[in-house]
Amino acid sequence: MPESQARPTALSFRARERVLDLHARVLIGGIVNVTPDSFSDGGRYLDPEAAVDHAAALVEQGADLIDIGGESSRPGSAPVAPDEELRRVMPVVRAVCRKVAVPVSVDTTKAVVAQRALDAGAAIVNDISALRFDPGMAQVVAKAGAGLVLMHMQGTPQTMQQAPCYWDVVAEVRDFFRERLAAAARAGIAVEQILLDPGLGFGKNLEHNLTLVDRLDRLVELGRPLMIGPSRKAFIGEVLDRAVSERVMGTAAVVAVAVLRGARLVRVHDVAPVRDVVRMVEAIMAKGAAG
């Protein structure tokens, strides 16, 4: 995985002691859900040993980081108490941090979960609320110097798909990120610690999701690397009329367009096929740039 100790650039991402170079190539994040109810793989990795083995397999397939989550954010999902989320994620975070060399991310909106995961060796906090749900989250990230993913979501997981509405989805997501970047800066979080995620499937209908992918370049203008998470999502199933397990090729198509539009990190369940897609798109882009 590309890492650099040089001065950070607009495509550098600082996560504690690491500086990841997202200019050299697009990075791939592998998803490990330790939940009973995630829309794609809920229940498959509840056993910590199974989750750790899966994380190691994703790294073997080419994952540049591992993102571990203990609370489902599928539409309509019920909130999980902090103690239960800790019970699910902490054995996995500790073991994965010991087993793999790549950075580990914890997917949580709770400061207590983030703090415990960072204490155990995690380097990144993936906060789907963009620091809005827990007033203590910003301080945890700032104090640790952790990497931070700020994601856009309209509403909450419980309400987000109840008739989402925008006057201009790209402009509104862009304005949201400007406000959240300012809030992070006020909390003492350096801009090079931040990735931005437009939140495909989080408070968006089919048109909103397709528009965001097609016009992702308008978010690149914000100056921070973009992460996308299209993996097996409902809007892909809506276009293709495919079950969750049959959306790998649809996911790959979204990833290809997103990389062409400027995404620098893709968060997926199916690392091996997406790795091949990303490398081919990069080869084509490099050839075009070389003339």
Image (tube, rainbow, N blue to C red):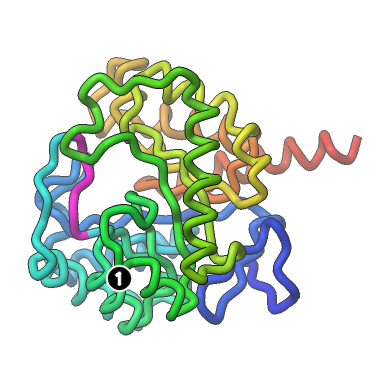
- Per the image, the residue denoted by label 1 is 114
Query: Which residue is farthest front?
Result: 186
Residue 111 seen in render: yes
Residue 127 occupies which quadrant of the picture? bottom left
Q: Is residue 26 above or below residue 194?
A: above
The kind of secondary structure the magenta stretch mainly shows is loop
Where does the C terminus fall, quadrant-wise?
top right
Residue sitting nearer the eye, 141 or 5: 141
Q: How many marks?
A: 1
Look at 53% across and 55% down and name the residue there. 182
Question: Is the residue 144 above or below the residue 279 in the image?
Answer: below
User: With respect to residue 27, does 95 lie above or below?
Assistant: below
Image x and y of residue 202, in percent = 32, 35
Q: Residue furthest right?
A: 291
The answer to which image quadrant residue 77 occupies is top left
Front one among 94 and 145: 145
Give the extent of the magenta segment: 70-75
Q: Tell whether 72 sits left or right of 55.
A: left
Which three-letter amino acid code belongs to the residue tagged 1? Ala
Inspect the magenta stretch and tell me whether residue 73 lies in it.
yes
